[in-house]
Image (tube, rainbow, N blue to C red):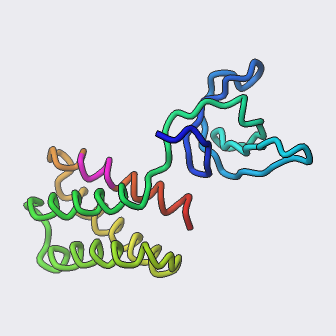
Amino acid sequence: MKDKIEKGDIVLINKRGEYHNQVGEVSEIDYNIFFVKIVLVKLGNQEETFEEKDLQLQTKKPSIEEVFASIDKILEVVDHIPHLPTKEKVELPNRLKYLKLDIPKLDKQVILKNFDSIDKILTATREADSSATFWQEIDSNFDKISSWIRTSL
């Protein structure tokens, strides 16, 4: 794992004070006039600024390769969803495949349109059967995709 803190990473604040031991997501990186890395960290509903030395990396944001692997895992699980209507049984895999093709192009509108459609289909399907064990795998992989989209576009 790289130790360099980047936008989208999850960090622990190790600076003494009000925010000590809180965990947040890096929302922006900048440098001050002395070339010290300044990190804007989202903590709940607020954002605070810290020097990089005051932060400890907890989790790196997912790479494109991890996002592709997550899409592939969801595609595998989609075949086993028992209550998926016929229209969604065709549309969901297609949307996932298009998302995989669109991500390298970094076309924000197209990626968000596909992602939102996938999210709606999964939400509607979950309402029909939320107790199935495959949801845990879908959710963890969908969260990786969501995190990458939120921090990379």
Residue at 22 percent of width and 49 percent of height: 135
Task: Indicate the position of residue 79 as horizontal and vertical percent values.
Answer: 10, 64
Residue furthest to the right: 33
Q: Is residue 64 above or below residue 36?
A: below
Q: Please, is residue 100 above or below residue 68 in the view?
A: below
Residue 12: percent from left, percent from top: 60, 29
Q: Quadrant of residue 142?
A: bottom left
Answer with the quarter of the image where residue 41 lies.
Answer: top right
Residue at (81%, 49%) from the top-left corner? 31
Q: Position of residue 18 (x, y in %)?
A: 76, 23
The quarter of the picture where residue 146 lies is bottom left
Dominant secondary-structure state across the stretch colored magenta: helix
Would you place residue 153 above or below residue 138 in this image?
A: below
Number of on-image labels = 0
| Range covered by the magenta-colored residues | 137-141
User: Quick one: quadrant of the C terminus?
Assistant: bottom right
Q: Nearer the viewer, residue 25 or 101?
A: 101
Q: Residue at image x 14%, y 47%?
A: 132
Tell me if residue 121 comes above or below residue 5 in the rendering.
below
The one nearer the camera, 32 or 141, is: 32
Residue 52 relative to residue 9: left or right: right
The magenta stretch spans residue 7: no
- Name the residue: 57% across, 50% down: 8
Left or right of 39: which side holds 136? left
Percent coordinates x, y for residue 110 in the rendering? 46, 81
